[in-house]
Image (tube, grey):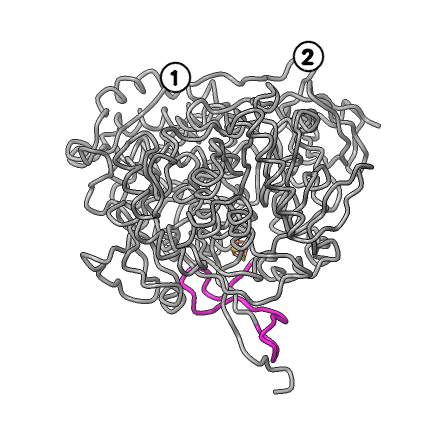
Amino acid sequence: ARLAPAGTAKAICGFCSTGCSLKIHLNAEGQAINLTPDPDYPVNLGMACPKGWEALTPLAAPDRATTPLLRDAHGKMQPVDWTQALTVFTNRLQSIQAEHGKGAVAVLSTGQIMMEEMALLGALAKFGLGIADLDSNTRQCMATSHVAYKQSFGFDAPPFTYADFEVSDVLVFVGANPCIAHPIMWQRVMRNRRNPAIIVVDPRRTETAMAATLHLPARPKTDITLLYGLAREVIRRDAVDAAFVTENTNGFAEFASFVNAFTPERVCAETGLSRADFDRTAELVTRPGARVSYWWTMGVNQSHQATRTAQAIINLALMTGQIGQPGTGANSITGQCNAMGSRLFGNATSLIGGYDFGKPEHRAHVGGILGVDPAVIPEKASRAYDKILDAVEAGEIRALWVIATNTAHSWVNSGKFARLRDKLDFLVVQDMYATTETAQQADLVLPAAGWGEKEGVFINSERRLGYARKVARAPGVALSDFSIFKLVAEAWGCGPMFAKWTSPGAAFQLLKQLSRGQPCDFTGIRDHAHLEAEGGIQWPYPESPAVPQPAAPGRERRLFADGKFFTPDGRAKLLFDEPVPLPEPPDAAYPFLLNTGRGSSAQWHTGSRTDKSAVLRKLAPTVPWIEINPADAAPLGLITGQEVAVRSRRGETKALAVVTAIVQPGQVFMPMHFPEVNCLTFPAYDPHSRQPAYKACAVALDVL
Ligand code: SF4
């Protein structure tokens, strides 16, 4: 009893998109002291990964931003109060807009803050501050899935529920390593009692590949060729669900004709896979009566032909009718805790609520609900992240407001951002820490509360809205992002426009109204308390007709059980293109192909939070490493632990060698968590989603 907490509260974890619930133990003052995973939540069932267990630690880091900081005439950051910070923010940005036009200011945001916060930011920036360009770091992780689903299904609508991991007979992971990237989802796979076949398509022999039934180490970015070859096999083996295709899809005849050229011989020659492995895969995904599910993450999304690769997966699920039923689906696993919230309510690519900027009736509808004159709503979507940076380079954008993201570290070809800094007249960074690579370059730092120090909703990968409570006080005078946005609105002079946004709870009610009649309708969710009581709720959850409540324990619901999609004619589209060669293949000068990705379940993105935990630092290397195959290491005389210089046409960094057959000959891998890695990566982008292709660039190695 002496050690019993005075109380408990629940919060959805603020790292990845799994959306685990954590039970926070509180002292008598209602402040968090430690946590345990929530045993009653249908997502994590009492489990958490190392990041979740350590979620409170980053809040107590000594380098928290505790007060606004302003760069003085000598280049030193000096503490100022909020009044001065907001005055400088407003004066500088308004004068830049007055001199160079409203478009001279842009925002780079995040998938890490609460749904209500990102919605308020999107509304404030575009409707209040007149900013045309706002994009977020979801461009780096989920833009491809967003576009692929929108084009194929008519709405950004991941169809699955996590229970599908447990009731699938064949699980195909393409460019995904859930063992370490989504460990709790992987635990759900481990709970599958149907003796499933697990197929992993990945050039690396990842932790997930090691645990798979079949690992297909296709050459980097030839996954699209493999998927088209499998589609041809589905047809040849008479495994097409003809009734589903006829009633619910468009484009099948054209697709069937297109994939006819992807013979097994061609697929094996281009991917490097054996014919036996290809045939075994075809046999497994066409097994009569089997429930087949397809899952993808960054190996697909972060490539130069990402959208069509995602759609090659979608096409396989559609042509076999493997969608909308237990254990099936073409399933994108999201990256960040609230990437889905950003996709629906961020007001960047889609008008807030999933509407179109280009449609006057949508602008009028949104304006009506928010009490905003539709005339202030832009008629087109924001430019993408890379185009915003191009506009900085061109001198067109002169100021950036960067919120809860670390562009200087994470953006592809990061040397470009470093060069662009000199082009900016003013850089504002709003973050928990003043020490991120981006914050250190700021003219003004606005100190933000972190996860646990504020409340709001995250939407996870299976479309589940979950509520995170405030369980700790932010340090110093740091404020929630929601409060900062409200203060900015007041200081800017547009406060009355956001009078309805009195609190995250009030904002939730506005977003509910915006969702009404949309595929993501959640008007049946009363409020935050309802979400908490239900253990999260998946959209759609309309008020009318009331959603039938599935039986416990999972309370899961999946989309498209009736075969009806969100396109105007209710049919899904099969979309495809010829495979495109690598933008920067290896050559004599740069003979290795570099792949980047998550290195450990204990590290999160640029490490701005996970590096604060001694426990997490012990669980993952704290220095950058590079994996190289023994066949490549031998001629270089390279052994594990030796330092190498890694060079690309854009930059150079150092790393410790790890000689391992995890990577194929000719390929090397580096984790993305170290700031130097992206000085190497090549700035190619998917033409549909503008997502950067982090996964393939040519590098050379010098043994030091
Ligand atoms: Fe948090 Fe993701 Fe780990 Fe769950 S799996 S505890 S959501 S980081």
Residue 664 visible in the snapshot: no
Up/down of 702 relative to 36, above or below? above
Residue located beneath label 2 in the image:
588
> Where residue 573 appears, x then y in whole percent?
26, 29
Up/down of 545 relative to 274, above or below? below
Residue 642 visible in the snapshot: yes
Residue located beneath label 1 in the image:
578
Q: Secondary structure at mark 2?
A: loop
Label 1 sits on what residue type? Glu
Query: Does the segment drawn in magenta span residue 597?
Result: no
> Where residue 454 appears, x then y in whole percent?
54, 60
> Residue at horizontal 54%, vertical 41%?
109
Label 2 sits on what residue type? Ala
Q: Residue furthest top?
A: 588
Q: Quadrant of the N terminus?
A: bottom right
The answer to which of 43 and 545 lies nearer the viewer is: 545
The answer to which of 480 and 238 lies nearer the viewer is: 480
Q: Residue furthest bottom?
A: 1
The prevailing secondary structure element of the residues shown in magenta is loop
> Where residue 155 appears, x then y in whole percent?
31, 38
Query: Does the segment drawn in magenta span residue 31?
Result: yes
Magenta segment, which residues?
25-48
Residue 185 appears left or right of 534: right
Up/down of 261 relative to 512, above or below? above
The earlier-in-sequence mark between 2 and 1 is 1
The answer to which of 226 and 701 lies nearer the viewer is: 701
Q: Secondary structure at mark 1?
A: loop
The answer to which of 74 and 139 lies nearer the viewer is: 74
Q: Is mark 2 within 8 Å of ligand 1?
A: no
> Where residue 294 appears, x then y in whole percent?
38, 40
